[in-house]
Image (spheres, rainbow, N blue to C red):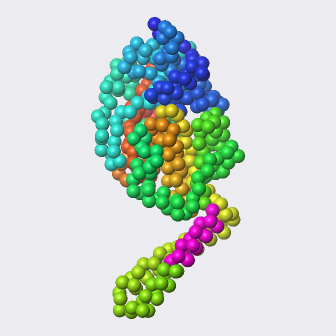
């Protein structure tokens, strides 16, 4: 009734794009990126008697001691409750891996284990049934892990449901913090633009600078270039930029407006010296003026240091899928953090997702700790979503004897 085989790109793409668990990490575009970067990759799946694809996965493999590790990242895409389809897929993939020297399979299903609010309080029951089902099929469930990484698929992510967001009032669905910073963006004249291929080197400079500051591993330029080419219009590289001349001119205009108010109030003080309200008003407006003057001075210094009028404040990469818009990699120049560029970038892409009818915005990885130490989480919560813990990793031996030795050796070396 069901048969396992490799699947052509067109059939796989049609299935993945329509599947509820579909993700950029299981896309044909991602296959192109990986294989161009030297990864061994194949598209496999199960067809029914009518030759319709009912299960699929992009699988990669790489050498480990005693054999090959076959990985399905954010997959496979199938109905895990359909035992026949699931078993057909697993048995087929095991045979596929065994023929290529496979030691074991490793799945990272795109399935949520539990949902949490911004404070780490559970807002759904744990998906123990899924874990039990996988274990009953012979899979070994890895211990849940927390911590942020750019080297592997995150086990924790932050998402925002967009289905009820009004396309004409998107920012109304954020927290007060986000709306405040977006107002600042408007005041500062920050502009967001889509990058071209020629801008990717500058994008890499930004992300590398940020990675060095925060001590994590950044993707190389080749990755960004291949992602740009493979995903086409579904990859969005963005910069938030500021023009110092425009910013300073706007600040000077505000100073002139405040000077006019101060002159008017001083006249009232002179006319009514016993009225205590006017000196308070004067002090308030003068304080505002000093803030604007300080901004002008700082911007003039920044412009001189930059040696150019328009500078990049922040940038980010997003991938668009029918199922979700995903925020992947980003950077912010420390000296320009006061311009709050990341907020305007996120707002632009959330708005685009809402207008395109995409049901979810995925802010992607967070550490899974809610004690206030995760600055990435603090930023993402300002857009008013919720945290998700995925079901994690599951391993299935292809060569049981060698796998047992492999695991024993890793435990002995303290790498389990």
Q: Quadrant of the C terminus?
A: top left
Work out whether 368 lies above or below 414: below
Residue at screen point 58% across, 51% down? 315
Residue 252 image offset from top left, x and y in percent: 58, 73
Work out whether 351 lies above or below 190: above
Residue at screen point 47% across, 75% down? 288
How many numbered discs sit on the rendered protein? 0
- Is 298 left or right of 277, judged from the image as shown? right
Q: Is residue 251 magenta?
A: yes
Question: Residue 62's quadrant in the figure?
Answer: top right
Decide if residue 116 is in sight here: yes
- Is 313 left or right of 21, judged from the image as shown? right
- Is 18 left or right of 203, judged from the image as shown? left
Nearer-the-camera pick, 416 or 192: 192
Decide if residue 64 is in sight here: no
Work out whether 65 lies above or below 164: above
Nearer-the-camera pick, 12 or 109: 12
Q: Is residue 245 magenta?
A: yes
Q: Main secondary structure of the magenta part?
A: helix
Q: Which residues are magenta?
A: 243-258
Residue 15 image offset from top left, x and y in percent: 52, 22
Nearer-the-camera pick, 291 or 397: 291
Residue 281 image offset from top left, x and y in percent: 41, 81
């Amino acid at each position: 009734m069901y048969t396992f085989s490799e699947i052509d790109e067109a059939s796989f793409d049609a299935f993945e794009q329509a599947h509820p668990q579909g993700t950029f990490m299981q896309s044909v575009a991602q296959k192109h990126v990986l294989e161009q970067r030297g990864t061994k990759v194949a598209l496999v799946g199960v067809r029914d008697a009518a030759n319709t694809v009912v299960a699929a996965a992009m699988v990669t493999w790489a050498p480990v001691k005693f054999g090959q590790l076959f990985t399905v990242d954010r997959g496979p895409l199938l109905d895990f409750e359909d035992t026949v389809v699931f078993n057909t897929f697993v048995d087929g993939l095991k045979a596929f891996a065994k023929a290529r020297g496979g030691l074991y399979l490793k799945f990272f299903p795109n399935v949520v284990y539990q949902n949490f609010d911004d404070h780490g309080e559970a807002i759904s029951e744990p998906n123990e049934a899924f874990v039990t089902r996988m274990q009953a099929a012979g899979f070994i469930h890895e211990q849940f892990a927390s911590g942020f990484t750019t080297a592997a698929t995150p086990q924790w992510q932050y998402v925002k449901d967009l289905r009820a967001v009004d396309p004409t009032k998107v920012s109304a669905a954020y927290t007060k913090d986000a709306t405040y910073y977006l107002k600042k963006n408007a005041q500062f004249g920050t502009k967001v633009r889509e990058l071209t291929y020629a801008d990717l080197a500058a994008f890499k400079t930004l992300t590398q600078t940020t990675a060095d500051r925060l001590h994590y591993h950044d993707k190389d330029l080749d990755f960004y270039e291949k992602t740009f080419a493979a995903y086409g219009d579904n990859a969005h590289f963005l910069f938030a930029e500021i023009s110092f001349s425009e910013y300073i001119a706007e600040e000077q205009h505000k100073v002139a407006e405040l000077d006019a108010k101060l002159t008017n109030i001083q006249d009232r003080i002179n006319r009514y010296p016993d009225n205590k309200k006017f000196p308070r008003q004067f002090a308030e407006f003068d304080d505002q003026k000093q803030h604007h003057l300080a901004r002008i001075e700082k911007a003039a210094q920044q412009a001189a240091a930059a040696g150019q009028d328009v500078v990049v404040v922040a940038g980010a990469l997003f991938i668009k899928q029918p199922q979700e818009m995903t925020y992947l990699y980003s950077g912010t120049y420390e000296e320009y953090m006061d311009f709050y560029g990341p907020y305007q970038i996120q707002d632009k892409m959330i708005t685009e997702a809402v207008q395109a009818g995409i049901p979810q915005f995925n802010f992607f990885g967070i550490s899974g700790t809610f004690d206030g130490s995760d600055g990435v989480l603090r930023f993402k919560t300002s857009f008013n979503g919720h945290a998700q813990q995925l079901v994690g990793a599951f391993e299935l031996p292809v060569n049981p004897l060698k796998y047992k030795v492999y695991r024993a050796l890793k435990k002995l070396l303290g790498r389990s």
